[in-house]
């Protein structure tokens, strides 16, 4: 047996391109009916997400609860998997906030 990890099946993941990912994330957030305000997104006038692009990743702040001055959860998007995880998390929180209203 070889001493290498076979989980990647011999393929390297494609390089992460933050500028392209940012375009895709923005499109997905608009599709979820969030209003874009610069690098921030709002739901019913309340800020729920902020994006801050960096050289090799995207810093993200997501509101824990729907509030005028929310507490934030922070994460960095630096891969396609992290990008999908972010959109899934936003969808979950939107569903939860809709139930809370």
Image (cartoon, rainbow, N blue to C red):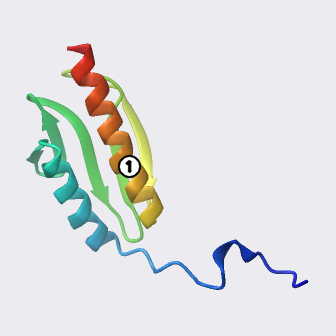
Asked whether, in this view, residue 78 is left or right of residue 98, the answer is right
User: Alpha-carbon neighbours of circle 1 within 10 Å: few (<14), some, or many (≥20)?
Assistant: some
Query: Can residue 39 be seen in this snapshot?
Result: yes
Q: Position of residue 24 (x, y in %)?
A: 24, 64
Q: Which quarter of the rendered picture does the C terminus lie within?
A: top left
Foreground pick, 28 / 18: 28
Which quadrant of the view contains residue 45? top left
Asked whether, in this view, residue 33 is left or right of residue 52, the answer is left
Q: Is residue 40 above or below residue 16?
A: above
Q: Residue at x 65, y 85 (%)?
A: 10
Q: Which quarter of the rendered picture does the N terminus lie within?
A: bottom right
Q: Residue at x 27, y 51 (%)?
A: 51
Q: Which residue is mark 1?
A: 86
Q: Position of residue 95 (x, y in %)?
A: 28, 29
Q: Position of residue 56 (x, y in %)?
A: 42, 70
Q: Residue at x 9, y 46 (%)?
A: 37
Asked whether, in this view, residue 74 is left or right of residue 94, the answer is right
Q: Position of residue 20 (x, y in %)?
A: 27, 73
Foreground pick, 78 / 13: 13
Q: Is residue 38 above or below residue 22?
A: above
């Amino acid at each position: 047996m070889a001493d290498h990890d076979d989980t990647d099946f011999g393929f390297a993941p494609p390089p992460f391109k933050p500028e392209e990912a940012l375009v895709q994330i923005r499109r997905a957030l608009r599709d979820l009916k969030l209003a874009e305000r610069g690098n921030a997104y709002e739901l019913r006038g309340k800020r729920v997400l902020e994006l801050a692009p960096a050289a090799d990743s995207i810093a993200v702040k997501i509101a824990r609860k729907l509030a005028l001055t929310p507490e934030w959860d922070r994460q960095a998007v630096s891969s396609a998997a992290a990008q999908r995880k972010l959109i899934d998390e936003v969808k979950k929180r939107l569903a939860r906030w809709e139930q809370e209203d």
